[in-house]
Amino acid sequence: MATPVLDKAEAQSEASPYITVTFRVRRFNPEVAAEAVWEDFQLEIDPKERVLDGLHKIKWELDGTLTFRRSCAHGICGSDAMRINGKNRLACKTLIKDINPEKPITVEPIKGLTVLKDLVVDMEPFFQAYRDVMPFLITKDTNEPTRERLQTAEDRERFDDTTKCILCAACTSSCPVFWNDGQYFGPAAIVNAHRFIFDSRDEAGEQRLEILNDKDGVWRCRTTFNCTDACPRGIEVTKAIAEVKRALITRRY
């Protein structure tokens, strides 16, 4: 009896989906050395998986000392923002097949914030700027409301885009002004101020505008569109900053 032979199509379907990929990771451990170094890792991985999956594979199978942040792994928490092949991205939303796996995939921490270890940066300056713009609803009525604060669909739509921010810092850490001057509020803080300045239920728009009228506020923006390009949620960040500038000039919002 003749031995069955797979035809070419069947042979391809039986082939492994895995490819060999090089992850080139920028490593920094202040307890070991004062300077960061690049380290290469060879992985067998399905190209349809994400960069985050590759980092997990390195940490769990090759080097348990690799340090990075992640939480939900679904593009909602924003904790795994990093520079991948020179661009700010979320590792959990970046597919390996989409970033040319034939060449080394470079992974490094986002810029403009102090690196604590490997891919982890100190987010405190970023969150302090966020807190400074008072990112919460403020009304003159200090008593608990007796009914809901009504708002039309049109009023809600006015600030709908800026409600999408997940505080990943991808926009702020892609800004050249922020790289050179950490005192600048940065795009994310301005986006979150925009969300409340243009909310018809809020009554602290003037306060927020005065905060952003500071020398480290919106006027530092050079409209390079880096922030808009970097946003993993597709927020029109540069447009939001321009609307805040316009509100400062016209006092209409």
Image (spheres, grey):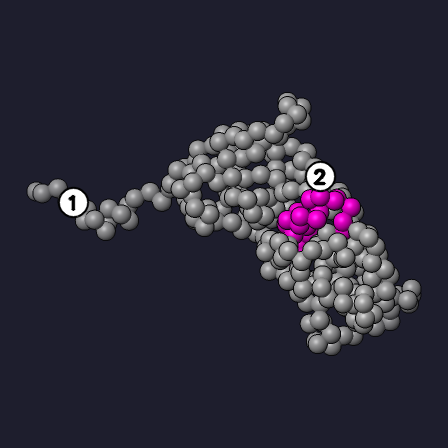
Whole-angstrom CA distance, mark 2 to mark 1, is 59 Å
Where is residue 53 drawn, in percent x and y?
50, 42
- The residue singled out by tag 1 in the image is 5
Image-based side of 39 in relation to 176, left or right: left
The first of marks 2 and 1 along the sequence is 1
Horizontally, is 63 left or right of 219 in the view? left
Picture layout, residue 91 above or below residue 143? above
Quarter where residue 44 is shown: top left
In the picture provided, is 134 more to the left or to the right than 107?
right
**Is there CB contact under 8 Å for labels 2 and 1?**
no
Q: Residue at the location (40% across, 42% down)?
A: 102
In the foreground, 224 or 128: 224
Q: Is residue 224 magenta?
A: no
How far from the left and from the top, in percent, is residue 161? Answer: 66, 65
Q: Residue 122: which disc? A: 2
The furthest residue to the left: 1
The three-letter code of the residue at mark 2 reads Asp
Q: Nearer the viewer, residue 209 or 223?
A: 223
Q: Which residues are magenta?
A: 164-185
Query: Is any part of residue 226 visible from this angle?
Result: yes
Is residue 189 visible to us here?
no
Three-letter code for the amino acid on which mark 1 is drawn: Val
In this view, the residue farthest toward the top is 32
Q: Is residue 15 left or right of residue 95?
A: left
Q: Quadrant of the N terminus?
A: top left
Where residue 35 sits in the image (x, y, percent)? Answer: 63, 27
Where's residue 206, x and y in %?
86, 64
Q: Nearer the viewer, mark 2 or mark 1?
A: 2
Badge 1 element: loop
